[in-house]
Amino acid sequence: MLRIAVPNKGSLSDATVDLLREAGYRTRRDSKELVVSDAENDVEFFYLRPRDIAVYVGSGTVDAGVTGRDLLLDSGSGAVEVMQLGFGASTFRYAGKPGQVATVEDIEGKRVATSYAGLVRSDLAARGLTAEVVRLDGAVETAITLGVADCIADVVETGTTLRQQGLEVFGEPILRSEAVLIRGDRPGEDQAIEVLQRRIAGVITARTYVMLDYDCPKDLVDRACELTPGLESPTVSSLQDDAWVAVRAMVPRLGRNRLMDELYDLGARAILVTDIAACRL
Ligand SMILES: Nc1ncnc2c1ncn2[C@@H]1O[C@H](COP(=O)(O)OP(=O)(O)OP(=O)(O)O)[C@@H](O)[C@H]1O
Ligand SMILES: O=P(O)(O)OC[C@H]1O[C@H](OP(=O)(O)OP(=O)(O)O)[C@H](O)[C@@H]1O
Ligand SMILES: [Mg+2]
């Protein structure tokens, strides 16, 4: 039975549960349920703290899991990223009070507060800098005001938390993170993990693409198909009226309205967009 770790709270939890549900797996009914057995799919889900997931997967006690790339790298657990999941995007950055620490080089000899000590230590080492890393559990933005650090390194999404504390980022992002599927680096349960990956990829594709149908004058079909090449190739079907054909192709959800306008301008009519509920490519 495949064992999969799922974030039980925090920013990645709800989106992960939605993804698994859409992929056809059983999910928990309330937030106190920590283990969910899905006998039909031969999978067991363990709801764990996002920070611990890479540790379990790296040690081989669970086969795969969902966590943030930042948490995976911070763990140094040896688990590997196998797939980006398209949510939970954030950056991991240094920040400080304006006028106090302006460049990454200024960190030399100072104190950096973070919940991601592994990431920060290896970034400082790669830059040849020596600084004291103060490991905190969360809310690190307050550490400077409270006097335990001179600057911080933390997750930044909208920047609201930093702004509220009067902090500003400096230097380039240490890392760009998002939710990822991870697995151990030893072989085992390979086929079952491939099925999981295919199911998740199906959900992501169904979210990223829509199905586009339209009628098109026969003499314009080549130009229309250039606009809608589909994934493999568009389906072109004949219509009762010999001067027209029907075209069907998957197109990216983003930009679909502009594409419909372009097809209309070209001479296509009866242009319809429908959601894709699920797919396997
Ligand atoms: N504001 C955010 N936007 C996007 N992703 C975020 C945000 N905050 C955290 N993350 C990501 O979520 C993952 C886990 O962090 P999260 O804060 O959800 O867990 P936690 O700190 O262990 O839990 P909690 O904050 O509930 O104590 C990390 O990979 C991080 O990059
Ligand atoms: O740039 P923003 O959109 O403001 O998001 C970033 C904040 O979100 C996370 O905090 P979380 O709520 O997880 O609290 P924590 O720091 O205690 O983990 C993260 O640690 C930052 O503090
Ligand atoms: Mg957090």
Image (spheres, rainbow, N blue to C red):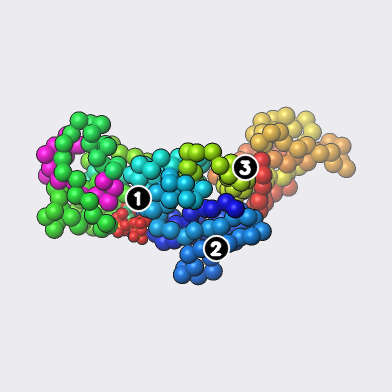
- Could you tell me which residue is drawn at 40 percent across and 58 percent down? 49
Q: Secondary structure at mark 3?
A: helix
Circle 3 sits on which residue? 191
**How far apart are the alpha carbons under marks 3 and 2?**
21 Å
**Whether residue 152 is visible:** yes
Q: Secondary structure at mark 1?
A: loop
Q: Is residue 260 left or right of residue 9?
A: right
Dot 3 or dot 1: first in sequence order is 1
Circle 2 sits on which residue? 36
The magenta segment? 99-117
Amino acid carrying label 1: it is: Glu
- Could you tell me which residue is drawn at 69 percent across and 40 percent down? 249
Amino acid carrying label 2: it is: Val
Amino acid carrying label 3: it is: Gln
For the residues labelled 3 and 2, say whether their Cβ atoms are less than 8 Å apart. Answer: no
Dot 3 or dot 2: first in sequence order is 2
In the image, is the residue at mark 3 within 8 Å of ligand 1 by its beta carbon?
Answer: no
Circle 1 sits on which residue? 157
- Measuring from the top left, give residue 27's x and y in whole percent: 56, 62
Assess whether residue 111 is covered by the magenta stretch. yes
**How far apart are the alpha carbons under marks 3 and 1?**
35 Å
Question: Marks 3 and 1: which is nearer the front?
Answer: 3
Dot 2 or dot 1: first in sequence order is 2
